[in-house]
Image (cartoon, rainbow, N blue to C red):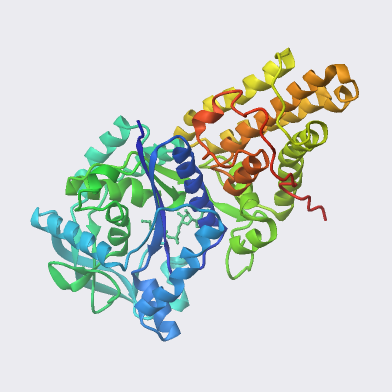
Amino acid sequence: MSNKFYITTPIYYVNDRPHIGHAYCTIVADVVARAHRLMGDEVFFLTGLDEHGQKVQQAAQAKGVAPRQFCDEMAPHWRELWPRLSVSNDDFIRTTEPRHKAVVQSLLQQLYDKGEIYTGEYEGWYSARAEQFLTDKEMGPGGKFPAEYGEVVRLTEKNYFFKMSKYQDWLISYILEHPEFVYPDYRRNEILGFLQKPLGDLCISRPKTRLTWGIPLPFDPGHVTYVWFDALTNYVTAAGYGTPRFGQVWPADVHLIGKEILMFHACYWPIMLKACGIPLPRQVAAHGWWTRDGQKMSKSVGNVVDPVAVVDAWGADALRYYLLRELPVGSDGDWTDTNFARRYNGELANDLGNLLNRALSMIKRYCKGVVPAPGPAEPLDDELKTTALDTAKRFPGRVAKLEVNRLLGDIWELIRRGNQYVDAAAPWALAKDPAKAARLGAVLYNLAETCRIIGILLAPFMPTTADKIRAQLGVAAAPAVLADAQKWGVLPSGGSLGEVTPLFPRKDK
Ligand code: ME8
C-alpha cells in the first residue's frame, strides 16, 4: 500500500535572485521527495514564492512598475531554475494567486468569527523613509537608529491581533509530547527555550495607508494581512484547503526550512492551525546555513554562489552531490570551490565513474558486451552482495530520519567496496586463463549487479546519473524502484549493455 507524503520548502521572497542557499533547501527537499517516490509513496512536493509585503512594494516602486508586474517579471527566475537543478516539485505556488487569497481570507474570517482576532493599538518606532516600524534589531548602539532610516518617530496605529498567547501552554505540551515535531533535536530545545518567555499576541494586519500590497482583511478592507500570516498559509492553500483533496494531502509530513525561520514555523504556524481546527504538520525540519570560504554570502561583498553558474560548469548532479554530501541536514556548511572540485574528481569521477566504467568496459571486452551468467558465490562475492543489500535495506530508515547525508555515505561505502572487489578479484588476470572463464563471468556479473543497485539508490540524489547508469547497463526501460535494489540477482544474464561512456569526465586543473 502506498503512503502519502507531503513535503514543502519555504516560499522564497520574490524580490531576491535565487542563490545557493535557496537551491540547497529545495534540493534537499527534492532528494527526500524522490526517495519517497522510489519507495512507492504518493508524493506531493511544493515550493513557491512569497510575493506580498513592504519589501516587494518598495522594490517595485524603485523600478517604477506596479508590484504585480514586478512579481511577474521576477517569478520566472525562480520557476525556471528548479528544472535546471533537476528539482521535481509537483506545484509552484505564488501568494498572489487567487486560490491563495481565497484561503487566507477564509482562515481570517473563521478566526474573526470565533473571536480569536481583536483590534488593538500597535505602538512602535516608525521610519517614514523606510515606511516601516523598526524593532530592536535595527536599533544601533546608544538606542539610535541608523541614518538610512531618516527621522524615526513614535507612532501608534490601529491594527488587528490574533490571540496567540493563550495557546502558549498548549504548544509547549504539544512539542514535549511530539518529539519528532521539531527536527533536529537541538532545535527543539531552542524552541522550548524560546517558549519560556511569554508569547505575545500576533499583529496580523497593516493599514492600507501604509501598505497596499497585501491580501485585504475580509472584515476590514482598510487593512491588509501581515506577510507571515499570508506566507505560512501557502502550505494549506496548495494542499487544496476547502476542497475534498485537502483530506488526502494534508497534513504536511515535512516543512523543510532554514534555521532562521524556525520560530515562525514551530510557534506561529502550529498555533494558527490549532486555532483554525486544522491538524498540525508532522514535522518542521530546520537546515543550517551556507557560508562561502567562511564568510557570510552577500551581494555587496559579491561572494554569492550562483547555482546556475555551477550547473553550467559542473552539471546539476555534481551540485546536488556536493550539497548533500558535505553536511547533515541541520548543520551549517561552508562552500569552497576547492572542496567542490576535490569531491568531483575524487568521489564522482574516480570512485563512482571508475567503478561503472571498469565493470562495463570489461564486459564489453571479455563478454562482447553481453551480461554474463552469475556463478557459485565465493566469500568475496558474498561480502559485496551483503554490503549492497544492507545499504538498500537501510534506505527507508535513513530517509525517514532525514539522514540523507549518511545515506549518501552508505552508498559511497558500497562504491568503494565495489572498487576493492575489482582489485581483489582481478578480472584481467582471470581473462588470461581460459579455464577461469566461468569465474570471470561471475565476477563481472557481480560488478554489474552492484552497479544496477547503485543506479537505483542514487536516483533521488543524482537522477540524471542514475538514469545513465541504468541505460549503460541496458536496464533503463524499467522504472527505478527501491524494492528492486533490495534483491540480488535481478539483472538478466544475456542482456546487452548500452553505450559505455564516462559518467563524470575528470576536470583537473
Ligand atoms: O524567509 N544558507 O524567504 P527567503 C542556507 N519568504 N539556506 C539559505 C541561505 C543560506 N545562506 N539563504 C537562504 C523567507 N536560505 C520567507 C519564507 S515560508 C512560509 C516564508 C534558504 O527568500 C533557507 O531555506 O528569505 C531559508 O529558510 C530560506 O532560503 C529563506 O528564504
Side of 85 relative to 62 (left or right)? right
Numbered marks: total: 0
Which quadrant of the figure contains the N terminus?
top left
Residue 436 lies, in percent from the top left, at 84, 18
- Nearer the observer, 147 or 184: 184
- Nearer the observer, 201 or 496: 496
Residue 75 lies, in percent from the top left, at 44, 69
Residue lying at 69% horizontally and 31% vertically, measured from the top left: 448
Q: Residue furthest bottom?
A: 64
Quadrant hosting residue 173? top left
Which quadrant of the figure contains the C terminus?
bottom right
Residue 158 lies, in percent from the top left, at 18, 70
Side of 15 relative to 504 (left or right)? left
- Nearer the observer, 375 or 267: 375
- Nearer the observer, 463 or 157: 463
Residue 424 in the image: above or below residue 312: above
Quadrant hosting residue 369? top right
Residue lying at 77% horizontally and 33% vertically, measured from the top left: 363
Q: Is residue 370 visible?
A: yes
Residue 77 in the image: above or below residue 151: above
Residue 307 lies, in percent from the top left, at 59, 60
Q: Is residue 15 visible?
A: no
Quadrant hosting residue 435? top right
Residue lying at 86% horizontally and 22% vertically, measured from the top left: 430
Residue 56 in the image: above or below residue 161: below
